Image (cartoon, rainbow, N blue to C red):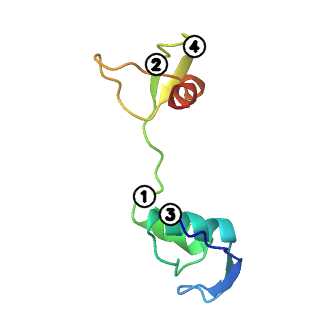
């Protein structure tokens, strides 16, 4: 597969007009996800997200990890027919 060499790029925000850096890592992430180049700086993106209600905190549910037994929270309502894991056990199961 063709590998792209990304370099930091300076872009102008479409909302506030300030310049911001679109890092090489961000460019690679955007390309992998199929996203287009951002038109807003991070501050304006966050402000717009908050205005649309996207900045609200998700409800957390207290659970006991089915693997190690520790108490933790998860951002979804657990179901009886599915196991629930703490972050550490979940990451181990994915590896």
For residue 32, the mark is: 3
User: Can you tell which mark lies on residue 70?
Assistant: 4
The tag earlier along the polypeptide, 4 or 3, is 3
Considering only order in the chain, which callout, 2 or 3, is on the residue closer to the N terminus? 3
Q: Earlier in the sequence, mark 2 or mark 1?
A: 1
Gap in Å between the C-alphas at discs 2 and 1?
A: 25 Å
- Report the Cα–Cα distance between label 1 and label 4: 30 Å
- Where residue 43 sits: x, y (%)? 61, 71
Report whether 94 appears left or right of 12: left
* In this rendering, position of residue 37 left or right of residue 7: left
For label 3, the crowd category at 10 Å Cα-Cα, with few meaning under 14, some 14 to 19 and many 20 or more, is few
On the image, the x and y values in percent for residue 5 come to 67, 74
* Disc nearest the viewer among 2 and 1: 2
Q: Nearer the viewer, mark 3 or mark 2?
A: 3
Secondary structure under badge 3? helix
Which dot, 1 or 4, sits closer to the camera? 4
Label 1 – label 3 distance at C-alpha? 23 Å
Residue 64, numbered label: none
Which residue, as the protein is rendered here, is positioned at the far top? 69
Reading the image, the residue beneath label 2 is 63
Q: Secondary structure at mark 2?
A: strand
Gap in angstroms between the C-alphas marked 3 and 2: 34 Å
Q: Residue at x 62, y 67 (%)?
A: 26
Q: Residues within 10 Å of mark 1 (few under 14, many from 20)?
A: few
- Across and down, in percent, residue 39 comes to 52, 81
Place of residue 32 in the rendered image (x, y in percent of width and height, measured from the top left): 50, 63
């Amino acid at each position: 597969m063709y590998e792209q060499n990304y370099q930091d790029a300076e872009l102008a925000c479409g909302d506030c007009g300030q310049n911001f850096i679109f890092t090489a890592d961000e460019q690679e992430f955007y390309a992998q996800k199929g996203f287009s180049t951002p038109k807003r700086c991070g501050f304006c993106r966050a402000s717009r997200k908050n205005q649309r209600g996207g900045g609200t905190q998700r409800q957390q549910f207290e659970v006991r990890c089915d693997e190690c037994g520790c108490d933790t929270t998860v951002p979804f309502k657990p179901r009886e027919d599915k196991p629930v894991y703490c972050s550490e056990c979940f990451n181990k199961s994915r590896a």
